[in-house]
Image (cartoon, coloured by chain):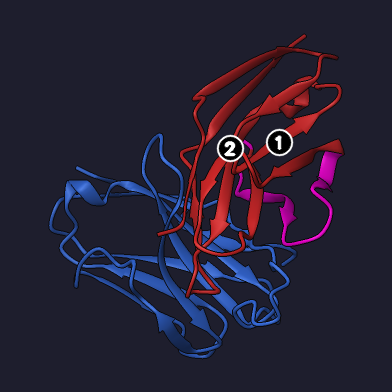
Amino acid sequence: AQSVAQPEDQVNVAEGNPLTVKCTYSVSGNPYLFWYVQYPNRGLQFLLKYITGDNLVKGSYGFEAEFNKSQTSFHLKKPSALVSDSALYFCAVRDIGSFQKLVFGTGTRLLVSP
Amino acid sequence: GAGVSQSPRYKVAKRGQDVALRCDPISGHVSLFWYQQALGQGPEFLTYFQNEAQLDKSGLPSDRFFAERPEGSVSTLKIQRTQQEDSAVYLCASSLGAGDQQGLGEKLFFGSGTQLSVL
């Protein structure tokens, strides 16, 4: 079965510093990978996706993610963190054999301090 | 509306009660999904509709859970005889296309969810 793992429950970073939120995946075949963000009392919002092509994917709000096939990773990155980036981040993979279903990780809480 | 709307925002039920959760997807969106998010966990798939057809209900935890989308727009998730383990946030999401058949990795638009607490 397809799965993703987010090894960090929480990531702390100071405003202005680069941030990385880690995700590793386990899939059969080519992975379709996604990052979503969840702000308090709001629904999940799509950030970016990797389907094929360039390993560096650019998304919303200045975020980007790097697909690394040899390390089976899809880490989310941003060069300079903002306090407003503080939220819950979820990595997800499309389930094989079911084009509709996404399998989510457990989430990583990002706290950006002023 | 501009986004996916869910109601009620919060629901408290006594164990054994039936509940109904409503989802209004973005107008024109073909696909509709229900996910369950337990505290501290990621969302878990419950069921999928393409228009009015329920094409995948493999994630429904038991036969107490039932979902419908009779006219291909609004959907209702019903839970009968609620149990404490049903306490979670229930998320609805919609997408424009029909099941990502083109392999484009279509993004989902999520509602804010209904937080269900079963006492």
- Under mark 1, the amino acid is Leu
Query: How far across and how far down the image is residue A35, in percent?
Result: 66, 47
Q: Residue A41 appears at what percent x and percent y? A: 57, 40
Give the residue at the far front of this rendering: A70
Q: Which chain is blue?
A: B
Q: Quadrant of residue B60?
A: bottom left
Question: Which span of residues is magenta-colored?
Answer: A39-61
Q: Is residue A40 magenta?
A: yes
Tell me the tag on residue A76. Answer: 1
User: What residue would you read off at disc 2?
Assistant: A23
In the rendered view, would you say B76 is above or below B2? below
The chain identifier of the residue carrying mark 1 reads A
Q: Secondary structure at mark 2?
A: loop
Name the amino acid, label 2.
Answer: Cys
Residue A8 x/y as whole percent: 52, 25
Label 1 neighbour load within 10 Å: few <14, some 14-19, many 20+: many
Rendered location of residue B71, percent (x, y): 52, 90
CB within 8 Å, label 1 to label 2: yes
